[in-house]
Structures are given as C-alpha cells and as structure tokens.
Image (tube, rainbow, N blue to C red):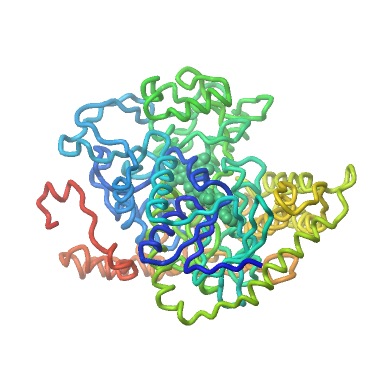
C-alpha cells in the first residue's frame, strides 16, 4: 500500500486552495494539492461579477476604506459573522487585489473623464478623476455603500483562477487532479493527512501531512437546483464531519441568489443589477422600490430573494412551462455595455435560453447559490477541535459571512484567507512538525477501512427495477431540501425534512449499484458520496429546525424576528461515530467584544429582539472613541478591536489610496 509524506496537504484546487498552497510553498514547505478536476476548472472559474476591496479609485468609490467595507460586511451578515475575521479581511482585501494585478489579472481600469452609467433606472454621467486614470476600477455590487467590486468584465473568477493556476506552476507546486480525498486520517486529536482515491485507477492510498487544509468549496448540490457546479457536493466538509471530532459551523446558513436563469439554474451575475439592471414582474412593473425604497435591486441577496418570492406569492410572477419566474431587464443598459462588461451573460442567454439580453428580458428566480456554513475554524483557519486540520474558502466557516455573504466578498475571501492561512499553516508546521509522530499504522487502518467500505458497496446486489437506487435517493434528498430547507422555512416543514433525510440516509447506506467495478466508475462515486451529502443535508435541516429566529438568509416564517437575545450564537454540528443524526452545540457571538454592536441593517424588515448587552457595549464604544479622539487611527482601532496583532507581520501595513497621497498624508 502506498503511503506518501508531505508538509502540507491541500485538498482542493480552487482559488482558496491554490492561494494557500502558494503561501505555504513560499515558506519553503513541501506542498501537495488535490483536485477532483483540473484545478483551473474548479468552481471559482465560474464567478463572473467581481471581488470586493476598498481601493477607492473609481469616482463612486471615493471615500471608501476598510471601515466602510467592514461595516457593510457585518450588516450584510446580520451580525452573525466574527468581527475579528471581518476586520482582518477588510484590511487584507486591497493587498490581495494588488497582488493579483502583479500576477497578471487584467482588472478593468478607471478611464479618465465622463462615462455613462445606469443608476436607479436613470442614465447618469459620472466623471472619473485624471489622477485615477489607469488604476483598478470598481462596480456597484453586493449592496455596499461605496462601489468597491473589482472585476475583469464578467469573467473575474476565470482570470483570477488562471493567474493562480499559473502561479502554482511557477512555484513548482504539484497539483494532482482526478484525485479525491475520501477520509481524513486522525487519532481523535490530531489530523495526519488523508486517504486519497485515484478517480481513474480506483487506487486508494494515504498522504500523511503535518497539516491538512480543506479547500473543497460549497455543498450547493444537495439542493436540486443550484448555481453551483456539479462537483460542489461538499465532500471536504463531509469527511471532516465523519471524523466525529471536527465541527461544522452554521450549516443552516445558505444563500439563495436572486437571479439564476429559469429553468437551468445558471447564474447571471449580480453585476447585472449592480450595473443598473432592473427586476420586473408579470406586468413589466419594476417592483423592488415598492419593497425596498432605499436599496431597491441592490439590497443584500437574502432580502432581494425573499422580496421576489413574496411578490410571486402575491400572484405577480410569470407563469411558464418551466415554473414561475420574474424578469431581469438589462436591455436598459444598452448593447455596448453588455458587449463590453457582461459578455458572458450574453453568451449564457444566447446558448441556454436562445434570447438576446440587449433586446429581451431574462427569466430569473432565486436559486441556491452559496454555502456560508462549513468547517468551523478559528481566525487562523484551524479547526479548534482537530489539531492540524485547517479549512479555507467556501468550505470553511471562518466566519466572515455570518448569515448572508455580500456579493463580491467570497472571491475576496478565497484569496485573502488563502494569503493568511498559508502563513498560519506554515507557522503551525514550523513550530509543531517535530512533535508529530506520523503513524503509518494509522494510515493503513484508514485506507483499509475505505477499501472495505467500497468493496461492501460493490458486493451488494444491483438494484431491482423500482427499488431504491442512487439516483432515486438523491432526487429524494434534492426535493426535500428544495421544498423544506429553502428561502422560507417553518417548524412543520423542517420536521418533515429531518425525518425524511434520516430515512434516506439509512437507505443510502444499503443501496446497491449496477456497475460494480472499483476503478473509474461514476456510479460507485455517486454511491459513496450520497450518504455523505445526506449527512450535510441533515446538519443544515436540523440546524434550521433548532434555530427559532430569522437571521440573514435563514428566514423562519414562524419566528420572523432576528432574536439577538437568544440566538446571537453560531450553530456547531458534529457527528458522533455511528449516530443517526448530528449533535448540535452553540458557540456564543459576544456583543461585549463587537466593534459594531447589533443594529438595523438599513434594508429589509426591522424586527429585532435586542440583546441586553447591546446598549452597554454602545456606551462603552462611545467612551473609548471620546477618550482616544485625536490619538489617531491606530491606537483607537486597537482599543476597539485589535485585529492587527493577529495578522502575520508582513501584512500589517496600511493600505495606500490615492486620496491619502493627494492629501500628502504620510506614506
Ligand atoms: C455561478 C457563481 C458565480 C459566482 N460569482 C461570484 C462573484 O462574482 N463574486 C464573488 O465574490 N463570489 C462569487 N461566487 C462565489 C465564489 O465563486 C466561490 O465561493 C469561490 O470561488 C469558492 O472558491 P473555493 O476555492 O473555496 O472553492 P472551489 O473553487 O469550488 O474549489 C473547490 C476545489 O475542491 C476540489 N475538491 C472538492 N472535493 C474534493 C475532494 N474530496 N478531494 C479533492 N479535491 C476536492 C475541487 O476539485 C476544486 O478544485 C460565485 C459562485 C457561483 C456559483
């Protein structure tokens, strides 16, 4: 049996995995990256809209800085995020964009002088500053107070992932594709690597590593219709859950994107609305300002998705053979804008709908899109429960996004978290590697266990006609998640969901397959992944059932208030070995250490049960501000929330902006 050794094993070749790998390799560690598919075909490649960073170059971004980005992120999260993480993130995002520029990402740039834009349905003229000419520009996206979403037309994820893929090659990092991590090797306290399955030959082997990083993306495919790629089945989170030790955070926090095309579920970017696109109903009426006078189409995604569903419930949807939908009108932007900045959207409309969005409205409806939940980590990306296990990107619950992530914050998270976790992993390996005794015996035991599990599947009789098969059980899971664990949730529906999923989970562990060979075999792959997907589905459904409040994307019709008094806490799910359901615990989110205490988001419904400590914390922050007024930004920030000390030293420096240079501020 093959056992390999490395310093850092990165499971996942998307943006988060590759950037973490580059960071660790630059610290002279041996790094291996695994991916199901060629790394440049990871789901990150599909991101169209852009990446948030407070550069402040574009006219509509003037005055932007880390404070504004931090505030937008916390409000967007509905106060569910970790504010330390949000601070670290907002500080790092400009550095990440600039690093990517240096690695060749062809960011769209500011062009001096006047240009036309559509804002709130009106065509307006904006004038860009001479001194900003040639710098990285930004679009309106994610309900932010300033325009800060940097983009490369509507192929942002594509250009970013290609730049990072090339960077990994330049750094000499081996990326093994068609290689799946199927189990984590651990002794209950320390992760020692993973069991890997070669998807072509079927070979099972072990990679023992001083640190293992899960960067496997989201788990959107447990819903029937999702904007996610078909490889987004959440296997990284599932194998972490299967350790019986690592915890998953806020699995009930799932984002539904307002504008996926009907019926395919392919996303058309929020950049469409950011650039001025409008949502219309069956009568062609622009309805969002009726619900959200301030932000209209640009309120946060959870809010826009719910308003759309509400409007359809009022009978204002468009009935079609493919189901009910609303319209997205980007024809208002004009053909030239679409040709230059929304080309991919045009292609999607042409190829999958047979329409021209410069002329026709696009049929859209809210669809599963982003997994805020994932493997719970501390601010350094390490699982507090299983040492040596790290997680990064959409697979993680670092927790930047709380209960709703802002458009453009996810691409930024992948690279920012990758930059940081690459360093923290290297620190961990340098300081602990000597103490780690690799255990080849343990590796053999884990590989043996996986081999026995696969052989058991292939030994079962092929399913009889009409009996359970992998596809029918999977459809059952997808239908349950769509019907009961969607945009609006309630007690009865969630109870039904949990009971159905428990049953499906048991049946999925008995199901046989028709193609019973152990090498390249898609049916076998589907069979061993299905119970794991069902385990994640159960964490999401049970988490949603127990959380009796509405926060961000988690909307309980029977508990419409955001309840800060009882629910300002993070759900942690873990799965005792052999159990039929996950166990839920809760981690408090402390108002006492918040820089921005809970309040109204500025959009959506104002329905909040206050936390008793909120007023106290507000008063405390006021007195800190009064005391340190005039002491300058750094001491004040340190007293409010000292994030700089947690950052690797090389990233602590201030971000420079043209506004500072103009004002002659010290550089
Ligand atoms: C259609 C779409 C558009 C989006 N647009 C935007 C946007 O404009 N702005 C924004 O900020 N965000 C956007 N997002 C979100 C963002 O793109 C993702 O959150 C982000 O790219 C995830 O990156 P990642 O590196 O965490 O995971 P991924 O890019 O999904 O990579 C996961 C990797 O893990 C590998 N993998 C999975 N399981 C295993 C396993 N068991 N063993 C080995 N390898 C494994 C896969 O092969 C892959 O390489 C969009 C998302 C979608 C769905």
Q: Is residue 78 left or right of residue 108?
A: right
Q: Which residue lies furthest to the left in this view?
A: 664
The answer to which quarter of the image holds residue 296 is top left
Q: Does 190 sit left or right of 597 as displayed? A: right
Above or below, 256 against 391 in this view is: above
On screen, residue 521 versus residue 130, left or right, reads right
Q: In this view, does 561 lie to the left or right of 499?
A: left
Q: Using the rendered image of the protein, determine whether residue 605 is visible from the camera's viewpoint.
A: no
Q: Confirm whether residue 643 shows in the render.
A: yes
Indicate the position of residue 406 as horizontal and vertical percent values. Answer: 44, 48
As displayed, is residue 21 above or below residue 108? Answer: below
Quarter of the image with the N terminus is bottom right
Pinpoint residue 148: horizontal percent, then vertical percent: 32, 44
- The total of numbered circles placed on residues is 0
* Residue 296 or residue 384, whichever sits in front: 384
Picture coordinates of residue 437, whole percent (x, y)? 54, 80
The residue sitting at the top extreme is 359
User: In which quadrant of the rendered image does the C terminus lie?
Assistant: bottom left
Q: Which residue is drawn at 21% across and 30% down?
A: 127
Of 249 and 37, the residue lying toward us = 37
Residue 506 picture location, percent across and down: 79, 59
Q: Residue at x 61, y 25 (%)?
A: 318
Camera-nearest residue between 491 and 35: 35
Which residue is most to the front?
A: 1
């Amino acid at each position: 049996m093959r056992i390999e050794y490395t310093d850092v094993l990165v499971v996942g070749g998307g943006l988060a995995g590759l950037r973490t790998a580059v960071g660790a390799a630059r610290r002279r560690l041996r790094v291996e990256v695994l991916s199901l598919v060629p790394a440049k075909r990871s789901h990150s490649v599909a991101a169209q809209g852009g990446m948030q960073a407070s550069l402040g170059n574009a006219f509509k971004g003037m005055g932007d800085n880390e404070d504004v980005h931090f505030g937008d992120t916390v409000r967007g999260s509905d106060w569910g995020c970790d504010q330390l993480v949000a601070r670290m993130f907002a500080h790092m995002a400009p550095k990440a964009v600039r690093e990517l520029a240096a690695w060749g990402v062809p960011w769209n740039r500011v062009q001096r002088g006047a240009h036309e834009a559509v804002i709130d349905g009106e065509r307006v003229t904006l004038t860009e500053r001479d001194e900003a000419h040639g710098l990285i520009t930004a679009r309106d996206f994610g309900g932010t107070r300033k325009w800060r979403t940097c983009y490369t037309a509507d192929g942002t994820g594509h250009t970013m992932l290609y730049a990072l893929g090339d960077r990994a090659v330049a750094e000499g990092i081996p990326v093994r594709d068609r290689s799946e991590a199927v189990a984590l090797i651990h002794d209950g306290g320390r992760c020692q690597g993973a069991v890997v399955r070669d998807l072509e030959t079927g070979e099972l082997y072990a990679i023992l590593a001083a640190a293992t990083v899960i960067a496997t993306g989201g788990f959107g495919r447990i819903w029937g219709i999702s904007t996610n790629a078909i490889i987004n089945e959440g296997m990284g989170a599932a194998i972490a859950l299967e350790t019986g030790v690592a915890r998953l955070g806020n699995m009930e926090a799932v984002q539904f994107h307002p504008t996926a095309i009907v019926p395919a579920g392919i996303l058309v970017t929020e950049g469409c609305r950011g650039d001025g696109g409008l949502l219309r109903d069956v009568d062609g009426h622009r309805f969002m300002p009726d619900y959200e006078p301030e932000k209209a189409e640009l309120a946060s995604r959870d809010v826009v998705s719910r308003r759309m569903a509400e409007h359809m419930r009022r009978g204002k949807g468009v009935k079609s053979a493919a189901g009910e939908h609303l319209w997205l009108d980007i024809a208002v932007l004009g053909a030239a804008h679409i040709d230059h900045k929304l080309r991919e959207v045009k292609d999607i409309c042409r190829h999958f709908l047979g329409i021209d969005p410069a002329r026709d409205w696009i049929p859209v409806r809210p669809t599963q899109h982003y997994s805020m939940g994932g493997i719970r980590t501390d601010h350094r990306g390490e699982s507090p429960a299983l040492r040596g296990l790290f997680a990064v990107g959409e697979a993680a619950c670092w927790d930047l996004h709380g209960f709703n992530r802002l458009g453009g914050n996810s691409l930024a998270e992948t690279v920012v978290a990758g930059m940081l976790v690459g360093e923290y992993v290297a620190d961990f390996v340098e300081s602990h590697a000597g103490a780690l005794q690799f255990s080849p015996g343990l590796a053999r035991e884990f590989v043996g266990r996986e081999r026995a599990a696969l052989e058991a599947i292939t030994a079962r009789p092929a399913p009889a006609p009409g009996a359970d098969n992998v596809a029918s059980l999977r459809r059952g899971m997808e239908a349950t998640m769509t019907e009961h664990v969607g945009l609006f949730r309630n007690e009865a529906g969630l109870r039904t969901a949990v009971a159905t999923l428990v049953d499906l989970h048991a049946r999925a562990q008995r199901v046989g397959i028709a193609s019973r060979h152990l090498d390249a075999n898609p049916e076998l792959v589907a069979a061993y992944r299905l119970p794991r997907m069902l385990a994640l589905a159960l964490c999401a459904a049970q988490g949603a059932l127990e959380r009796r409040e509405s926060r961000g994307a988690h909307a309980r019709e029977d508990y419409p208030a955001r309840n800060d008094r009882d629910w300002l806490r993070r759900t942690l799910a873990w799965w005792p070995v052999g159990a039929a359901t996950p166990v839920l615990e809760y981690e408090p989110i402390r108002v006492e250490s918040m820089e921005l205490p809970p309040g109204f988001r500025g959009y959506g419904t104002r329905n909040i049960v206050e936390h008793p400590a909120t007023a106290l914390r507000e008063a405390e922050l006021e007195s800190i501000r009064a005391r340190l007024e005039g002491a300058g930004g750094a001491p004040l920030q340190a007293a409010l929330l000292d994030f700089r000390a947690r950052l690797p030293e090389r990233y602590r420096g201030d971000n420079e902006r043209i506004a500072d240079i103009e004002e002659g501020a010290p550089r």
